[in-house]
Amino acid sequence: MGVKQILLLGNEKLYERSEIVKESELEFIQSTVQDLHDTMMNFRKQYGKGRAIAAPQIGVMKRLLYFSVDNSMVMINPEVTFKSREIFEIWDDCMCFPDLLVKVNRNLSCKVKFRDLNWAEKEIFLEKDMSELFQHEFDHLEGVLAVSKAVDVHSFSLVSERTAH
């Protein structure tokens, strides 16, 4: 357990679809959640950002997400059950390319079904920034990066260029 290396843009594993977590894997998942937490906190200390992380970002190809916004939350095998028609545009960042921003479109809200660490089934409705954050992390489970969802060819910027203005 501890801080793991975050896979960076160009690593082929980031483009693979993650596997479903089985209930028999919960012990492994518990230690992976600790790794995700430690890795994200280390990233946050280094870059001053980082609200969530997907298991594939540390090379664990399982459908597992960890969030630490106001409280921490773990989503095992999340499924989107609803996406709003309303879309908004946002400059997205990612731990896999910390110096790059990508302008993408996201759904304003979504509903998600998932399992928690006790294997209980949960459902949550997410709006605005939490909806965007979930969609970004969920894409990692599908092997999709924000760079693949850019609005157009002008939708890329170095972080330093966006914060300098």
Image (spheres, helix red, strand yellow):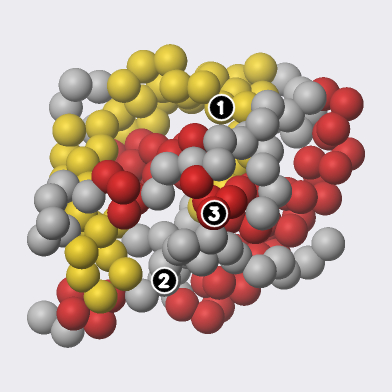
User: What's the residue type where badge 2 is placed?
Assistant: Pro
Find residue 78 and report its image quarter: top right
Q: Residues within 10 Å of mark 3 (few under 14, many from 20)?
A: few
Mark pair 3, 1: CA separation: 23 Å
Find residue 159 and report its image quarter: bottom left
User: What's the residue type where badge 1 is placed?
Assistant: Pro
Q: Is residue 64 left or right of residue 144?
A: right
Sequence-wise, which precedes: disc 2 or disc 3? 3
Mark pair 2, 3: CA separation: 18 Å
Residue annotated with mark 3: 12
Tell me what residue is drawn at x 22 percent, y 50 percent. Answer: 150
Look at the image and tell me whether residue 73 can be seen. no
Q: In the rendered image, which quarter contains the C terminus?
A: bottom left
| Residue 83, position as x, y percentages in the image | 31, 21
Is residue 122 shown above or below 161? above
Sequence-wise, which precedes: disc 3 or disc 1? 3
Tell me what residue is drawn at x 82 percent, y 24 percent. Answer: 23
Sequence-wise, which precedes: disc 2 or disc 1? 1
Tell me what residue is drawn at x 75 percent, y 33 percent. Answer: 117
Residue annotated with mark 2: 98
User: What's the residue type where badge 3 is placed?
Assistant: Glu
Is residue 39 shown above or below 76? below
Look at the image and tell me whether residue 85 can be seen. yes
Tell me what residue is drawn at x 65 percent, y 57 percent. Answer: 58
- Provide the secondary structure element on which disc 1 rests: strand
Residue annotated with mark 1: 78
Instruction: State which mark lies toward you, 2 or 3.
Output: 3
Mark pair 2, 1: CA separation: 25 Å
| Residue 125, position as x, y percentages in the image | 41, 25
| Foreground pick, 92 / 115 | 92
- Provide the secondary structure element on which disc 2 rests: loop
